Image: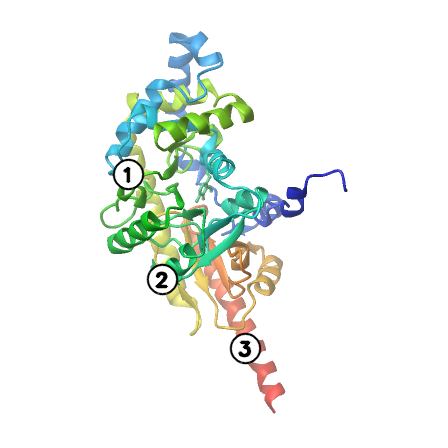
Amino acid sequence: MNFLSERMNRVGPSMIMDLLKTAAGGGFTSFASGLPDPAMFPAADLATAADRELSSSPAGALQYGAAEGYAPLREWIAEHLKTRGLKATVDHILVTNGSQQALDLAARLLIDAGDLVAVETPTYLAALQTFDSYEARYLPFSRAGTDPDETSLAQALGQSAKSIYLLPTHQNPSGLTWSEGARDAAAALIAKSRCTLIEDDAYFDLRYDGEPQIPVSARLDGAIYTGTFSKTIAPGLRVGYLCASPDLVAKLSCLKQITDLTTGSLTQRIVHRFVTDFDYSAHIASVCDTYRRRRDTMLRALKQSMPAGVSWTHPLGGMFLWLTLPEGQDADALLKEAMQHKIIFVPGQSFHPDGGGTNALRLNFVSEPSHRITAGIELLASLIRDQIGRESHTAGELGA
Ligand SMILES: Cc1ncc(COP(=O)(O)O)c(C=O)c1O
């Protein structure tokens, strides 16, 4: 199709979407999705919030709104972000159509074809797809334990990275959270490098243990920080936001107008009503209670059933953990086998721009109820055991 733009050579269907379509066929235990549990959606309160908005301000709720977003919601977000240590006023906030749009706008603002973007490996697949669509090239940096490897990060930044994309809290896909020290070190390196930080904090509020960590963006000037109500309220509302300096917000707002004029007025007002008229903190606490239990169920099942040589992360929050098979094992082959047994997950390679992660997989621990998590992990463990057994048998035969 030679009439398509160059960038389309780098844009393709998402493996996760394909897997979700398969799972929608029914009967699957899905550890693949990034979907919150719909039982956690505060549907009745959202209906009340919608009703209040439509009765009290029908024109405002149904009319086009300002490109920057509904001012009372922007003010609320700015106050909320101050509790995370960010210096935010209403002028720092742009409401977006989900935080995915915030990432897209940030990428469009910063990336020309061929520009270098530093990214942790593994990292959020849909961010890579966004950067791909602007024809970015990558400077991947690796991890040492739960923190980034400082030498690898410094090397990536030293190679003329124009931007850096970070997800230091409850990362998708690994579930890992950087320490305070690692955040300080990264902020210092980024400040020296003069590249622009895009920090994705989609999972900040889904914290199950310990104290929240201050974002890297709070430690330096000029960052673009993104957040969302998708994980705590409901993704179908499509309300996210970014926080950046007012001059960047003005530019990003121009890009947003080109894309979609504005985020839906009604959904922004529903979110604003919900966070102000209802007890948002109590709602988050109840979501966290349920997800913490499911995380613990998955961790317990993994500990009880996984064979030696398999390791996994212990997330402090978020929705995912990262499982690593022994070297040489193939997560794609495991997925094919698992699908025969109606289990799906996402193989690790999709989260690596550099072809790594072939022996790793991302497991979502929030979407399935506890009994299905336990049964699914036990089955997965037996498939992994079989795969390892087959491989070592083959290796033995080859060596004989
Ligand atoms: C790390 C991360 N960032 C951003 C998003 C985008 O979410 P939304 O557009 O619903 O805010 C997701 C969704 O799964 C995510 O996992």
The reply to whether residue 42 is in sight is no
Which percent across, then down, holds residue 21? 61, 44
Within the displayed image, which quadrant is ligand 1 positioned in? top left
Residue 386 position (above or below residue 226): below
Q: Quadrant of the C terminus?
A: bottom right
Which percent across, then down, holds residue 244? 36, 33
Q: Nearer the viewer, residue 369 or 217?
A: 217
Going by the numbered disc 3, the residue's amino acid type is Gly
The reply to whether residue 325 is in sight is yes
Disc marking residue 149: 2
Q: Residues within 10 Å of mark 2 (few under 14, many from 20)?
A: some
Element type at marker 1? helix
Which percent across, then down, holds residue 43? 41, 27
Going by the numbered disc 2, the residue's amino acid type is Asp
Indicate which disc, 2 or 1, sits on the residue closer to the N terminus: 2
- Of the residues tagged 2 and 3, which is closer to the observer? 2
Q: How crowded is mark 1: few (under 14 residues within 10 Å), some or many (20 or more)?
A: some
Indicate which disc, 3 or 1, sits on the residue closer to the N terminus: 1
Which residue is the site of mark 3?
A: 389
Which percent across, then down, holds residue 212? 25, 45
Q: Residue furthest bottom?
A: 400
Element type at marker 2? loop
- Of the residues tagged 2 and 1, which is closer to the observer? 2
Residue 348 position (above or below residue 26): below
Which residue is the site of mark 1?
A: 285
Element type at marker 3? helix
Residue 4 position (above or below residue 311): above
The answer to the question of whether label 2 and label 1 lie on touching residues, with beta carbons closer than 8 A, is: no
Q: Confirm or reject: label 3 Cβ below 8 Å from ligand 1.
A: no
